[in-house]
Image (tube, coloured by chain):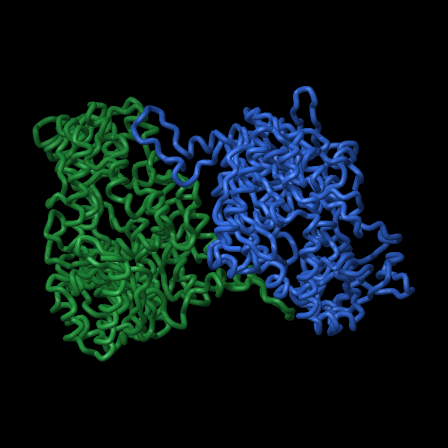
Chain colours: A blue, B green
Amino acid sequence: MSETAASKRLSKWLSVFGQALKRGDVETAASMFAKDSYWRDLVAFTWNIKTAEGRDAIAAMLEATLTSARPEKLRLDGAASEADGVTEGWFTFETHVARGHGHVRLKGDKCWTLLTAMNELKGHEEKAGPTREKGVEHGSRKERQTWLDRKMAEEAELGHQRQPYCLIVGGGQAGIGLGARLKRLGVPTMIIDQHERPGDQWRKRYKSLCLHDPVWYDHMPYLPFPEHWPVFSPKDKIGDWLEMYTKVMELNYWPSTECRSASYDEKRREWTVKVRRDGKTITLRPKQLILATGMSGVPNLPNFPGARRFKGVQHHSSQHPGGEAYKGKKCVVIGSNNSAHDICADLWEHGADVTMVQRSSTHVARSDTLMELGLGALYSEAAVKSGITTEKADMIFASIPYALLAGFQVPVYKQIAERDAKFYKKLEKAGFMHDWGDDDSGLFMKYLRRGSGYYIDVGASDLIAEGEIKLKSGVEVTEITPKGVRLSDGSELSADLIVYATGYGSMNGWAAKLISPEVGEKVGKCWGLGSNTRKDPGPWEGELRNMWKPTRQEALWFHGGNLHQSRHYSRYLALQMKARMENIPTPVYGLSEVHHVS
Amino acid sequence: MSETAASKRLSKWLSVFGQALKRGDVETAASMFAKDSYWRDLVAFTWNIKTAEGRDAIAAMLEATLTSARPEKLRLDGAASEADGVTEGWFTFETHVARGHGHVRLKGDKCWTLLTAMNELKGHEEKAGPTREKGVEHGSRKERQTWLDRKMAEEAELGHQRQPYCLIVGGGQAGIGLGARLKRLGVPTMIIDQHERPGDQWRKRYKSLCLHDPVWYDHMPYLPFPEHWPVFSPKDKIGDWLEMYTKVMELNYWPSTECRSASYDEKRREWTVKVRRDGKTITLRPKQLILATGMSGVPNLPNFPGARRFKGVQHHSSQHPGGEAYKGKKCVVIGSNNSAHDICADLWEHGADVTMVQRSSTHVARSDTLMELGLGALYSEAAVKSGITTEKADMIFASIPYALLAGFQVPVYKQIAERDAKFYKKLEKAGFMHDWGDDDSGLFMKYLRRGSGYYIDVGASDLIAEGEIKLKSGVEVTEITPKGVRLSDGSELSADLIVYATGYGSMNGWAAKLISPEVGEKVGKCWGLGSNTRKDPGPWEGELRNMWKPTRQEALWFHGGNLHQSRHYSRYLALQMKARMENIPTPVYGLSEVHHVS
């Protein structure tokens, strides 16, 4: 089919679909979807992040949202294309209150996948390009306020005389990226963080840490990395970038500030948040509370018998400062995911005697291979060259419903297995328990489902294969002795240092800690799709639990993920905040049930 | 003529010209130029910034440079165009050591203007995009140095155990933009600046200061302003941006450091520079010394009789902190250029009683009109939309030889005069002496010729027209009395504050001050074209004196200008540094004679 024919087909579908929506004809609209079909909506129709799966669910979603959304003006945006029987293309649309961008895939004349995403609220567009501010007010006026006057006044007032509309707890990349979007939308926002300086979230980690995702995947909103930025940012360099970002985006950021407690006043519809800043307790009263404390939530510290008696140093991986002090020392790392590998390699590089304790199987993908086969089509120099901007890549990625994603991933990992067959053979020969995920869908699905269970190899696997990092696999820790770690095979590893690279709990652990255990339970588990695979129990959710969307606790939000997710989904979270601040009706469709508390 | 025909004509000219160059046939090559023709070379052929005017000069330049430059591979880049009998287009070319970019305008089959500009040195290309660094070294090695280790080691060593190749005195936008380019080229560079923080060069000026040039004109190298950046940056905001830039570009920058003296050792071909840092004197021994201390050079403090007896506050405009302290006070501002206007308006806004003393006529252009008619075609939102990137705009601008520029500007200012006729009438009615430059070529030519003599109106002119800022024009200052200013018409202005907005000397004043009066005289006047107009005495130079190119003092360089010039010409200055560091032969053609010492 030619490009023109594909465009015609898509335009026609959009036109008929648009007309059905306009006249509220749910039956016709739903009938235009295939039996197996998916409509993913990012805030535009549902004021939620929601995928309706199948005609019935789509009809139900339309039934509930059409009257308030009032969609119109669905127009093909650019040329459509056709391959393997699927016609696909982009479109723009409007709702009663917003402008949006969408993507559609047709099989024959029926819709297979539909993405609708809100772009901006009408009347509340961000000022940029031709609408940017002038910066100076020409003409003369007595007692003019300069940019600095206004900035200093805002800094002095916000959190004291004037309350922020949003409070973001956590000033890492997620918190400040969202903060930047809210700033551009004119939503008064305060970001608090316990570290002394923005970027310390990275700087204070172990010395050899670098981003595991490549630069094209990692851009912050509004201010992309320059062309010479390295592929994998070293931790201190990304720390400096984030500090600079906080400054030039003019964010209201309180460093060295700890959130002590938060409670919601249902009547006043307002939070009371106690924070500790420079030794003083300050009470903030934001309307919206956003936890951006890291998608990994609270560190999981295992409760091994005997741990208190251990005479050496022991800490969670998140507290590990790096290997400088451990030259010639015996170090045991419990765990076999990313952090465990990074820390083992770093200890080895510093001349320590390192043993990794692998308790369950782990998926490993070599960084180079993963970048090329896993991310290359959307996030790479080649993608940039072929016109796939970051924004476009994010939208293409978002257009694939999670229900289909695992299926799309399986062949990628098959290819990875083939290309790196020798590598995997070597690794397994060394006794490393390796898997490809419950359904062979590999690393990214593990990330989405459980946020763990994998290592992006940047060198540690070779050390394991060569015996430089010693490996005890298929064992459990039975107890910690004064001098080391006793394992389920009866052996004992003597240790000067034990690192518990045992992962993190769900983010709602933060809600339990800061607000109350009841609220933690009420909102339930964060992250995961309900795929009914290991550590991601069903039922099927179709979207990440509680992320970037309304939760069971009014005015409580979770924000985070990797740099790509934080960048892309901060847009929708920011629009949800702005709409609420402006009293634009935001009827939420399909608020999820809570099936798991952690 | 169609686009294809234009491209064919240009390709043909390039091909024949290229062949003539290749076989060293200067006569044929020169004959391909029109009688009135211009070849502007930015470092590619001449290792200088040089315009050869007319066939004979072009032939002489070719005669001298062809053997070493060895140009080849002249290829049309993109489509050519034709309008009003001029065919023009872009091309790429190579020399023996470099790759370049050029622009040509033909009248008929003869070349009218030619631009050749060096882009990069072969074998020393900047790493960016597909060649960017990886950031992390995959694999494992004992005692790995991280990014931070290397950065800290460099900071600790440079200027102490290890000498910088380049020393840049002055860390404003010019110094750090050049520093960034040198960093990308791997040239060890130290930037020193007397202020406490990068950006203080702006922050410490009077409160209401904003950039007078628009954002599209002001981008720094590598890191463009984001889309929402205001059109005219307020001083503190640009200060923060420059501070961030210094950090993320990883420049070696010593703040609070003053250059005390410098001398050149001809034998060792090295500078001895004494700097004062944190109360200690440190001796630096760079191979190249770059003065980026502001194109305006040393402040001109007039020597009016009686000034010592004045009982109020008096200072040069560069020292003026803003009007906060002068509410209800009598203030006299001597001068009528940009700073004088800004300071008068700022004082008025703070409730002072302000008089401007205009000693000679001044050109005024309203900011909005100037932005639209003067800069809009190259540096505006519209230009960005039509595909004119900053780099392209810089090159288009550079392609017009200075000898033609005044002629190109006259109609622009005629249009400005018509559009703002009422404004000018009002201003003149208030007694303001207004001019359009000696040849009606307006503001930008005044800037290039003398760096003074104009005001970009952002509101002060209305205050003058309305009598809110009082004006004494056509008078000279005869003396400063204890209580005010006596003028040549016999009147006396009483004053609590006198601001001398009396401009700056030539940049070689810095060389005289830091190195020696002899070196100041040897290199001679900086800036200006030799146009034989007011404050720009002849003979005609065809390029700005001493800027960004070799001077009569070996290893001494001047860098500066507005943000556009600093951005664009820092490229050529950086390439000159890199070539010298790498011992690439850099035979300089046409080093200018010195005709004026200041």
Instruction: Find residue B424 and report its image quarter.
Output: top left
Instruction: Find residue B589 and report its image quarter.
Output: bottom left
Position of A65 relative to B371 (above/below): above
Pick whichever, A385 or A233, lies toward us: A385
Which residue is drawn at the image coordinates 67% and 59% (left, top)? Answer: A322
Q: Is residue A30 left or right of residue A217?
A: right
Counting labels gives: 0
| Residue B377, percent from left and from top | 28, 46
Pick whichever, B539 or B555, lies toward us: B539
Instruction: Find residue B413 and report its image quarter.
Output: top left
Which residue ends up furthest to the top in the rendered image?
A: A267
> Is residue A304 something one can see in this rendering?
yes
Which residue ends up furthest to the bottom in the rendered image?
A: B23
Quarter of the image containing the C terminus of chain A? top right
Which residue is drawn at the image coordinates 73% and 46% (left, top)? Answer: A528
Q: Is residue B570 left or right of residue B125?
A: left
Pick whichever, A332 or B114, lies toward us: B114
Which residue is drawn at the image coordinates 11% and 69% (left, top)? Answer: B56
> Is residue A286 something one can see in this rendering?
no
